[in-house]
């Protein structure tokens, strides 16, 4: 059996899917199998996949199902997996050639590590690099459940690799969550295992203007659900909850600010300060919004 099963959920992603599949084929580590879950696509995904099936044979399992959403598609892949490790790649993202090789090194001789992640560059729909995240994060590895709960640590999905046995112990993706389902699973794994950092740029993450993260209200409700679900569990106590609440209201403030809704953004930043007034980024956000708000209210001459 392969060492790594590569989980690729796809929904109407025919435009980008070949780039993702090609990036798996280009891996320097070759003991992999792709589990491609077509989550009810209505575009030409089947036609795009056909030549890959012919070329890759048993190294590509193509599974079609009615549309059930991202968490359900990933869970279908997990149920059909058999490898020791599972690695995530969304259909519009791209792996760099040493992605799997570098990721698997982070588990060598470290049985206490259950999950690893690495650095990314964000790219736009056209594939051009927007920015790069390639610096260690504070409290970014080891026993970091609290940092994951408070969202103080960012774990990019296309860089995630985890042991198959972890989901046997903690369960699969929570299909009731409309967002944050990935962080939910990483938290559950991190409560039992250490998290390792792969200190290399290993993937490109494609951003989209249609992403759910651009909808502040939906993201707020999803993150509140996540926070309450885990409150009181390991690493998720009263103080961590205050920090987590502050973080989501700061994120909401920044999202509204990007839309020019400064009064609403400032109100959210005040909620963020109320939950955790010592956060430097929260103070910075609130101060910046206050200055913009005062500027908007100056009388015109």
Image: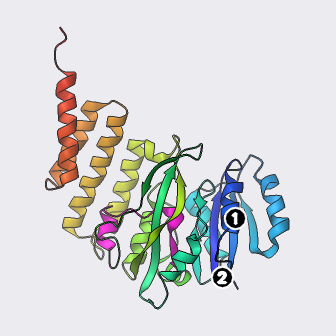
Q: Height in image: 133 above or below 112? A: above
Q: Residue furthest right?
A: 54
Quick check: 159 left or right of 233? right
CB under 8 Å between callouts 1 and 2?
Answer: no
Report the Cα–Cα distance between label 1 and label 2. Answer: 14 Å
Q: What residue range appears in magenta?
A: 143-163
The foreground one among 111 and 43 is 111
The image shows residue 14 at horizontal and vertical percentages of 71, 50
Disc 2, SS: loop
Residue 290 lies, with reference to residue 217, above or below; the image says: above
Residue at image position (38%, 62%) is 154
Residue 253 in percent (x, y) is at 29, 42
Label whose residue precedes the other's in the sequence (1 or 2): 1
Binning the other alpha carbons within 10 Å of mark 2 as few (below 14), some (14 to 19) or many (20 upward) gives some
Q: For the point 34% across and 79% down, which residue is it?
A: 142
- The quarter of the image holding the N terminus is bottom right
Residue under label 2, please give it: 82
Residue 301, horizontal then vertical, whole percent: 17, 8
- Asked whether, in this view, residue 183 is left or right of residue 146, the answer is right
Which mark, residue 191? none
Residue in the picture at 18% in, 43% down? 270
Question: Which quarter of the picture shows residue 224?
Answer: bottom left
The residue wearing badge 1 is: 36
């Amino acid at each position: 059996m392969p060492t790594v099963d590569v989980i690729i959920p796809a929904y109407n992603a025919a435009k980008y899917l070949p780039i993702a599949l090609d990036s798996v084929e280009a891996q320097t580590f070759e003991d992999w199998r792709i589990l491609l879950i077509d989550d009810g696509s209505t575009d030409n995904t089947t036609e795009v996949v056909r030549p890959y099936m012919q070329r890759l044979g048993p190294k590509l399992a193509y599974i079609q199902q009615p549309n059930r959403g991202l968490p359900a598609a990933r869970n279908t892949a997990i149920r059909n997996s058999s490898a020791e490790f599972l690695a995530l790649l969304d259909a519009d993202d791209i792996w760099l050639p040493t992605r799997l090789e570098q990721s698997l090194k982070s588990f060598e001789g470290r049985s206490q590590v259950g999950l690893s992640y690495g650095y990314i560059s964000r790219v736009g729909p056209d594939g051009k690099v927007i920015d790069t995240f390639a610096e260690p994060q504070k409290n970014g590895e080891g026993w970091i459940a609290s940092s994951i709960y408070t969202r103080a640590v960012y774990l990019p999905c296309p860089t995630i690799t985890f042991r198959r046995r972890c989901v046997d112990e903690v369960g699969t993706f929570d299909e009731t969550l409309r967002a944050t389902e990935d962080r939910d699973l990483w938290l559950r794994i991190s409560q039992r295992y250490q998290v390792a950092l792969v200190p290399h740029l290993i993937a490109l993450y494609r951003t989209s203007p249609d992403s759910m993260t651009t909808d502040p209200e939906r993201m707020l409700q999803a993150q509140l659900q996540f926070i309450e679900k885990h409150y009181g569990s390991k690493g998720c106590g009263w103080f961590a909850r205050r920090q987590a609440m502050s973080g989501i209201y700061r994120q909401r403030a920044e999202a509204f600010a990007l839309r020019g809704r400064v009064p609403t953004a400032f109100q959210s930043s005040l909620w963020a300060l109320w939950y955790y007034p010592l956060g430097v980024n929260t103070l910075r956000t609130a101060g910046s919004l206050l200055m913009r708000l005062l500027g908007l209210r100056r009388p015109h001459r």
